[in-house]
Amino acid sequence: SPTIDKVLIEYIKWLKSLGLVDDRGNRKGNWAFVTWGDCDIMSTLRLELIYKSIELPPCFNRWINLKDDAIFKRHYRRKPKGGLRACVESVGATWEGRAHNGLVDSINTAKIVKNMVQTGFRFIRPTRGLDRNGTPLGAVSPN
């Protein structure tokens, strides 16, 4: 399988073909990634790229965590209990695939987003992000 540095280049090319980023991966317009938890971008991707000395494209500097109380709980008036699968099924969508597979989790997370939009939710702002140094907002500086 391709290495992460090659995948990121292709991913940025794909986002550019959709008019979402420029050549350097800077976001064009008002959009953000949507995740099921903060760890996908804030920890897993960011820390792997640091470890491999690969620059995180700037479009990853903010995201919307669906599990955040300001999102799922505010819209559905209940906490997101039981994990992603239970939440997908709780909104009337059908779970597809094997949990904790990146593509599968993305598809199933998108089902919640689709349901939220169809039932009147407006995504206004990201719930988390990184500062200019790539440090998660709200994190305590090691200095």
Image (cartoon, helix red, strand yellow):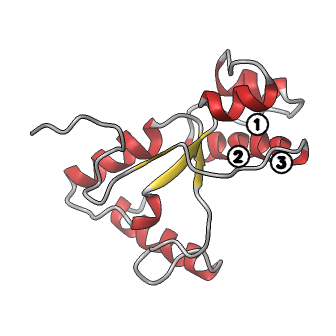
Which residue lies at the image location 90% right of the left edge and 30% below the top edge?
Answer: 92
Horizontal relation, residue 139 to residue 35: left or right? left
Is 143 left, or right, of 41 in this rendering?
left
Q: Residue at x 65, y 42 (%)?
A: 104
Q: Secondary structure at mark 2?
A: helix
The residue singled out by tag 2 in the image is 107
Looking at the image, is mark 1 or mark 3 nearer the viewer? 3
Do the residues bearing badges 1 and 2 touch, measured as CB atoms within 8 Å? yes
Q: Is residue 19 above or below residue 128?
A: below
Q: Residue at x 71, y 31 (%)?
A: 72
What is the x, y in percent for residue 29? Answer: 61, 73
Image quarter for residue 31? bottom right
Observer-nearest of 5 and 142: 142
Residue 96: mark in rendering: 1
Give percent across and percent down for residue 27. Answer: 51, 71
> Which residue was labeled with disc 3?
117
